[in-house]
Image (cartoon, rainbow, N blue to C red):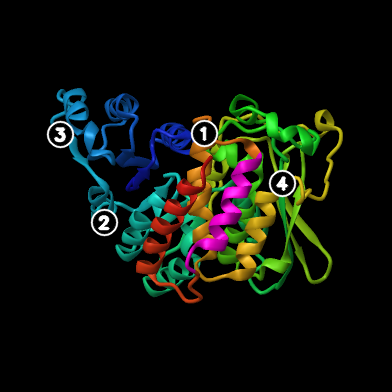
Amino acid sequence: MKKRQIAILGSTGSIGTQALQVIEEHSDLFEVYCLTANNHVELLAQQAHRFHPAAVVIANEQHYDELRRLMADLPDVKVYAGSRALDEIVEAQPIDMVLTAMVGFAGLSPTIHAIRARKTIALANKETLVVAGELILQLAQQYHVGILPVDSEHSAIFQSLVGEDQNPIEKILLTASGGPFRLLPAEQLATVTKADALHHPTWDMGAKITIDSATMMNKGFEVIEAKWLFGVDASQIQVLVHPQSIVHSAVQFHDGSVKAQLGVPDMRLPIQYAFTYPRRMPLSSERLDLFQAQHLDFFEPDLKKFRCLALAFEAIKAGGNMPCIVNAANEVVNRAFLEDRCSFPQMADIIEKTMQRATFSARPDYEVYVETDAEARRIARESLP
């Protein structure tokens, strides 16, 4: 059987490295066609030496010469650099699936190019649907491309919907761990540090998404993503804080029945399910022991304490390019917080100011999204203390 050729956008990040573990475990089924990274040159070169892809791309062109030097003993692996190279590599004829594991707005353009090249999308870059969900879904329909969710929550919803094609969704139950500050009094958030925020209680993720989890902006983005992926109104999506991170999400149908997907916190499972759908393959992972888990707790999120989640809901209600504005501002303040240039509560303050000042467009196209992203980033940077 011909091995599926997979391009991994963002191979050096948390999702990308775990995807390579899945591919390695099922080397009889999958082969790496392309690996890409933004700045992590040494790890990208190490991955190339281990998996021997046809090509590697470093998005930051300043690292091109160093990557060439590190890859000098692999003359058969083509080395490219820059954002244009990312757009072009996903169009390569042998590729069967593109795993979009890049972080942020940068994932939008290569995802669009991959769809137009009729490549199946394993979607781990939630910002793509947050920023331009309507456009992405239109393109996927136009080019008859499947989009398979990789986020644990959206994979859980997807798995719960298998076999339910004709049954309307009454409600999506989107779970959230609550992050590291779930039990911290709101008045103490002003003094938390990035080290505190990066200490996630259940998941091991990259820095950007871990901070988004601490503010719960990540969950707001997932609500937007679920709206587009599953064709429901945002009012049909309920966020549940579930500290154990065992119920990864659930679907309630109009007969009152609820189907959920449960498992230990391990991103390799949703990655592999996207790779092998509709088949389930063996995975050498820890198994869920409900006797050991003992109890499962669920709480309503505190929207006053976690204002970023409330702002995401406002963006959904406004529609148009407002989610794009929120995403751009969030990327700026997330980085600023990691660099000690703003406090935890100031992140929500700056996002809200950006929402008020940026130009709103009710019916944006791709060019408007690009302009909106640039304008919102400028406003957010100017609003930093």
| Residue hosting label 4 | 306
- Of pointers 4 and 1, the one earlier in the residue sequence: 4
| Residue stretch in magenta | 345-359
* Pick the front one: 342 or 141: 342
The verdict on residue 322 being magenta is no
Using the image, tell me which numbered label, if any, was put on residue 76.
3
Look at the picture and state if 153 lies above or below 337. Answer: below
Binning the other alpha carbons within 10 Å of mark 4 as few (below 14), some (14 to 19) or many (20 upward) gives: many
- Tell us which disc is closer to us: 2 or 4: 4
Say above or below: 367 vs 3. below
Q: Residue at 37% across / 43% down in the picture?
A: 8
Q: Amino acid at mark 4?
A: Phe
Residue kind at label 3, given as amino acid type = Asp
Q: Amino acid at mark 2?
A: Glu
**Real-space Cα separation, disc 1 to disc 2, in angstroms:** 39 Å
Residue marked by disc 1? 341
Q: Position of residue 254 (x, y in %)?
A: 79, 71
Label 4 and label 1: CA atoms lie apart by: 20 Å
Q: For residue 209, what is the image quadrant?
A: top right
Regarding mark 4 in the picture, which secondary structure is present there? loop
Q: Secondary structure at mark 1?
A: loop
